Image (tube, grey):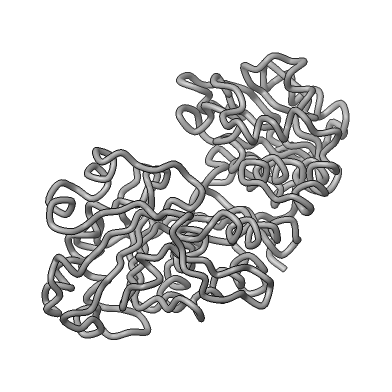
Amino acid sequence: MHFKYGYGRTYKEFDINDENILMELRQNHVDIKLTGADEVKRALDNPIGTDRLSKIIKPGEKVAIITSDITRPMPSKIVLPLILEELREAGVKYEDITVVFALGSHRKHTEEEKKYLVGEDVYNKVQCVDSDPSDFVHMGVTSRGTPVDIFSAVAKADRRICLGNIEFHYFAGYSGGAKAIMPGVSTRAAIQANHSAMVKNEARAGAMDDNPVRLDIEEVVQFVPIDFILNVVLDEKKNIIKAVAGHHVHAHREGCKFLDSLYKVEIPQKADIVITTPGGYPKDINLYQAQKALDNSKHAVRDGGIVILLASCTEGLGEEVFERWLLNADSPDSMISDIQKNFELGGHKAAAIALVQKKAKIYLVSDLEKDFVRKLFMEPFDDISEALESAFNELGQDAKVLLMPYGGSTLPYVKA
């Protein structure tokens, strides 16, 4: 069978014998009724687990609306006007509303970026601020030892509304829900304490009930109550195809179920060889971006198998701390043990790659220098056919291959 996958701004073509193909993962078909603002309005009219937002908030209360920063695809400019309509219906004045961009550990925005994220109309009506990890209120400590240190504008608000998009997250299970608070508006020390559990087996994409990172995130809400959430699921073109509103757990879980129905794909068994790709530019511009497609592949490859990652990485590794961790490591094992002792954001993605390397060999088809790739504990290839030939020589000519052309989105699982 012939395949043609995105690679940088071009593509790579290759062939695999039909008898070697286990399956090619594609997203499931889901009927979409409403999209965009219409779907957001539907969700606000039908909240899950709470009253309508306009019935929850009272006039005179200070309201913090926490939304994503510019590194996330959350379409705040579509959602916020509808949230403000609900608040106005409740009698809330614009001067009592603050939009807080949840920076986590990311850089601050320019004023132009803030305006771009929320739209000029919202920007001119309400105060829009970045979270500031140096300006926080200590509100307690979770049972797992995470300090609940929350940006003061959020901690001191009478009401909190959290916005976000839901997608698979490689160690928190899913994005969205209470993640707007932790890590969104938390201090670096709090984030590091929470994220340090990422090395545990239960901290994995698509896992919720036993996931120590997600459970810790949601315990934070006991100290910092969330009154309402509005979360969206986006398609590949960043259009809203599903919205959920209401309770921070019940509504969030409904959104996660929808995401599962779209992108969680059952596979008959784990494969000897997995070919995964972010899908070309801009998702494969560097290894930091391509890591998500690599991480999802670990759920499809057998122990001792081979993952072939197709990612051009024209801009190299892509993040300074990530690069330092990868290039200074003695082995994948050392990265895993080091992240447990001294968690560092950026280093956590290097450790995530190391966790895949503990399970399977990684062949990297990229534009990176071969000796440089070897320093990353990966085997370098210029061409996918060459990588496949090497994998078959190592694992046998009857090895089964699973293909993930949308590796960053699709989550494979073997039914128990």
Q: Evaluate whether residue 230 shows in this view.
A: yes
Q: Position of residue 15 (x, y in %)?
A: 65, 24
Point 70% across, 49% down: residue: 300
* Quarter of the figure with the C terminus: bottom right
| Quarter of the N terminus within the rendering | top right
Vertical position of residue 179 compared to residue 340: above or below = below
| Nearer to me, 224 or 398 | 224
- Provide residue 58's location: percent of width, then percent of height: 20, 83
In the image, residue 74 sits, relative to residue 244, either above or below, namely above
Residue, x 46% and y 27% (percent of image)? 281
Camera-side residue of 319 and 246: 319
| Residue drawn at 13 percent across, 57 percent down | 125
Asked whether 88 or 355 is in front, the reply is 88
Is any atom of residue 31 visible in this view?
no
Whether 189 is drawn above or below 313: the answer is below
Give the x, y percent position of residue 90.
15, 79
Between 111 and 166, the one lying in front of the other is 111
Looking at the rendering, which quadrant does residue 371 occupy? top right
Residue at image location 33% in from the left, 84% down from the top: 50
Q: Count the marks: how many?
A: 0
Task: Answer with left or right where residue 221 lies relative to residue 276.
Answer: left
| Residue 316 position in % (x across, y down) | 60, 22
Q: Is residue 226 left or right of residue 11?
A: left
